[in-house]
Amino acid sequence: KLLSEKNEIKPATLYLVATPIGNLDDISFRALKVLRAATLVAAEDTRHTQKLLTHFEIKPPKILSCFEHNEVKRVEEILAELRSGGTVALVSDAGMPGVSDPGAKVVAAVLQEGFPAVPVPGAAAVLAALTVSGLPTTPFYFAGFLPPKAEARREALMRLKSEEATLVFYEAPHRLRECLKDMMNVFGARKGVAARELTKLHEEFVRGNLQELWKIFKGKEALGEFTIVVEGAEHREGS
């Protein structure tokens, strides 16, 4: 009884729905249930989400774009749907909304207005890469995307130099070489893993120390989205 009550889709509620990061089979039964019941789907990219919805034969009454540059503007429309008793499903292009993706501002506004925000967890690149990295998984520090400009990126890495937790980053393919070069210069010969195209057809894990990874990708075209896992700083007694 308690389980069925927990699985009931409630009105006037925001659901943060995790979507597959590549393999469509990673969608959860609960995510599909919420998407089918939603009166409004707020999506980072409506075209991308429409392909997912079409694949699973889901036709929501309304679908709304909600991405980085219009998230604040979309808040009022989402709140209006909740005030009318609607059920809103918030999704990003892949993974969990709000994790290096839009969503956090919507959640904050919804909670401020007194409406519940409910997570529907699922695939996440950060955890997928971390768990098969071979590096310690507890604790870990998720840094997301580093700044695109070189000076700011190096400054961000310097702030993490003494962090003992395993570090996890996201990076775009066109910045991978420079990112690995900066990591090599700041972190030295620490172990690392460059994971690309997670759960997709061309999934690949490139392992080695940071110098080795940089040399590999220096002469190899980087394709696909990357998750980089780096060994944390060595523990120093008394530090």
Image (cartoon, rainbow, N blue to C red):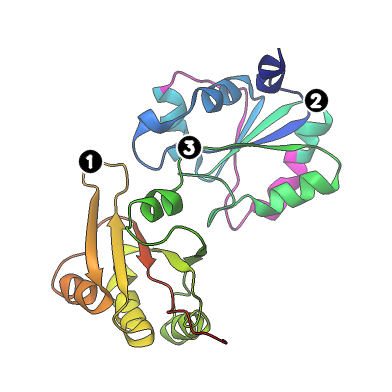
Amino acid type shown at disc 2:
Gly
Q: Is residue 122 left or right of residue 193?
A: right
> What residue is disc 3 on?
19
The mark that comes first in sequence, 1 or 2, is: 2
Mark 1 Cα shell of 10 Å, populated few (<14), some (14-19), many (≥20)? few
Q: Is residue 166 left or right of residue 176?
A: right
Residue at 69%, 47% (x, y): give it.
74
Residue at 64%, 25% (x, y): give it.
38
Q: Quadrant of the C terminus?
A: bottom right
Does the magenta segment cover residue 61? Answer: yes
Please report the bounds of the magenta region as a residue range. Answer: 56-78
Residue 190 x/y as whole percent: 32, 77
Of badges 2 and 3, the one in the foreground is 3
Q: Is residue 206 left or right of residue 162?
A: left
The mark that comes first in sequence, 3 or 1, is: 3
Q: For numbered disc 1, what is the local secondary structure?
A: loop
Q: Is residue 221 above or below residue 127?
A: below
Q: For numbered disc 3, what is the local secondary structure?
A: loop
- Residue 153 is drawn in which quadrant? bottom left
Q: Who is closer to the viewer here, 214 or 78?
A: 214
Q: Which mark is residue 85?
A: 2
Q: What is the spatial separation of the Cα atoms under label 3 and label 1, in whole angstroms?
A: 17 Å
Q: Who is closer to the viewer here, 146 or 56?
A: 146
Q: Who is closer to the viewer here, 224 or 165?
A: 165
Residue 16 x/y as whole percent: 62, 39
Q: Is residue 43 above or below residue 8?
A: below
Residue at 23%, 63% (x, y): give it.
207
Q: For numbered disc 2, what is the local secondary structure?
A: loop
Q: What is the spatial separation of the Cα atoms under label 2 and label 3, in whole angstroms?
A: 24 Å
> What residue is disc 1 on?
201
Amino acid type shown at disc 1:
Leu
